[in-house]
Image (cartoon, rainbow, N blue to C red):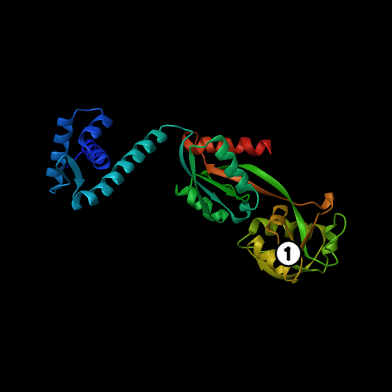
Amino acid sequence: MFQLSQLRCFVAVATELHFGRAAVLLNMTQPPLTRQIQLLEHEVGARLLERAGGTVRLTPAGSVFLREAEDILRRSQAAALAARRAMRADAGSVTLGFIAAASFSVLPTVLLALRTALPDVQVMLREMQTTDQLDALAGDRIELGIVRPFVPRSFADASTLMREPLVLAAPRGHALAEGPAMPLSALQGQPFIEFCPSETRYLYELIAGRLRAEGVAPETVQTLSHTHSILSLVDAGMGVALVPASAQRLGYAHVAFRALQPHAALESELHLVWRKGSREGVAHTVREALQRAFAAV
């Protein structure tokens, strides 16, 4: 089998089309360079270069082999770099799960923080629901996740990344669309679009629990799993909803947002989750960088 050193010799000659210049580039004399090419041609079983009248040119086989040789050399360099990065805690790759709602505001902050603090870390993103992320974390398919608060798991640790208020989303022109901070009692009897109790359990329980505690009973017209789907129905005039404030970034043309009164304020949370006992490697470094970044925010 041919060696990488022989491929480097061949690529140098094929690029320069001159044995003397190639030898200078490789910091070697011409006779051993010629010998390396001969050994390579013997291993390949084909003539790769032709010399005639002081000129060098690629054979048809040599032209095909050159592309493959360059690819092998590139991949060998990439493999060596990956191996060296694996020995560092500030370089390499990490697989990060995130819920769809995190893409409104948290995910851009995450990516900016990592590009700034850890430019040699490659982030592999996986969009998943919270329960799917926990399963993936248990199965080592992701290393970190951005999730809603969850029932404690024996294998998982978590910390709060961000808290944000919930706001009213109403069709523009609706009686509740404008005004000062609104009491929850204003939702009594209103057509209401709420989060699905099975697929978006955290937000459903957060909102429904507070409404029950306040004795407020809006008229539920639809239950949906994703904030953008809820806002699309608000945009169509089907009702009002309570959504995280970051949803205002979605920019629905016919949706207005209104703050809630402080005493009735609701806050949702996003947590960073990781495998318990994980204190080494790139994932640990990324986790610490994100915790610092969000603490500063």
Instruction: Report if residue 113 is visible in the image.
Output: yes
Residue 174 coordinates in the image, percent (x, y): 83, 67
Q: Is residue 125 left or right of residue 105?
A: left
- Farthest right residue? 180
Left/right placement of residue 225 relative to residue 33 reads right
The residue lying at 67 percent from left, 35 percent from top is: 296
- The residue indicated by pointer 1 is 253
Image position, residue 220 (x, y; %): 74, 69
Q: Classify 41 as above or below 182.
A: above
With 248 as the anchor, is 176 left or right in this view?
A: right
Q: Name the spot of residue 197 as percent of width and height, x first.
A: 65, 63
In front of the other: 179 or 165? 179
Which class describes the residues within 10 Å of circle 1: few (<14), some (14-19), or many (20+)? few
Q: Position of residue 22 (x, y in %)?
A: 24, 34
Give the residue drawn at x 65%, y 62%. Answer: 228
Left/right placement of residue 265 relative to residue 294 reads right
Instruction: Name, please, the residue furthest toward the front.
Output: 53
For the N terminus, the quadrant is: top left
Classify residue 184 by image quadrant: bottom right
In the picture shown, does residue 135 fall above or below 5? below
Task: Kindly indicate the quadrant of the structure image that contains residue 51.
Answer: top left
Q: Nearer the viewer, residue 32 or 257?
A: 32
Q: Secondary structure at mark 1?
A: loop
Q: Amino acid at mark 1?
A: Ala
User: Is the residue 4 above or below the residue 230 in the image?
Assistant: above
